[in-house]
Image (cartoon, helix red, strand yellow):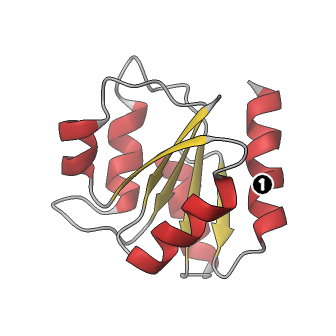
Amino acid sequence: MKKILIVEDDIYSQDLMRKIFRKDFETDICSSSEEYHEKYSDKKYCVMIIDVSIKGRKNGLEFIKEIRGITSTKNTPIICLTAHAQTKMREMALDSGADLFITKPVLNKTLKEAITYLIMRT
């Protein structure tokens, strides 16, 4: 089963995404870049979903930049997920290295289609 990483600090959103993906993917969920490095940095993911507003020393955009600088994850597809729908935020996310920018709330179908698209593209 393919693995996805979800970096999201809202517990409700974590539970919702876990339920959405449980049939199709093995999901690892963390709430910060620090937690990722402690628990999941040695794993390979087919897609990462990273929220802009996460706990810890780095926000989601800074974490995306970091991921793009690591040899083992630099080509992993990343979806930037956020409640911030401003055009500038979209530009910042894509400039940070995100492959797709999706605003919350998002339909389950839309999120699954985005993941399928990124997997097929790689």
| Quadrant in the picture for the N terminus | top right
Q: Residue furthest front?
A: 23
**Of residues 66 and 13, the one drawn nearer to the viewer in this rendering:** 13
From this view, report whether residue 44 is shown above or below residue 112.
Answer: above
Q: Is residue 95 left or right of residue 61?
A: right
Coordinates of residue 22 in the picture (x, y in percent): 64, 51
Q: Which residue is located at x 18 percent, y 49 percent?
A: 34
Q: Please, what is the three-letter code of the amino acid marked with disc 1?
A: Lys
Quadrant of the image containing the C terminus: top right
Q: Is residue 112 above or below residue 77?
A: below
Q: Nearer the viewer, residue 24 or 95?
A: 24
Q: Residue at x 52, y 30 (%)?
A: 45
According to the image, label 1 marks what residue? 112
- Return the x and y of residue 83 as percentages of the image width and height: 55, 81
Q: Is residue 91 visible?
A: no
Secondary structure of residue under mark 1: helix
Residue at the spot 47% in from the left edge and 67% down from the top edge = 14
Query: Image quarter for residue 86?
Result: bottom right
Which x, y percent locates residue 13?
50, 74
Left or right relative to 37: residue 53:
right
Q: Is residue 63 visible?
A: yes
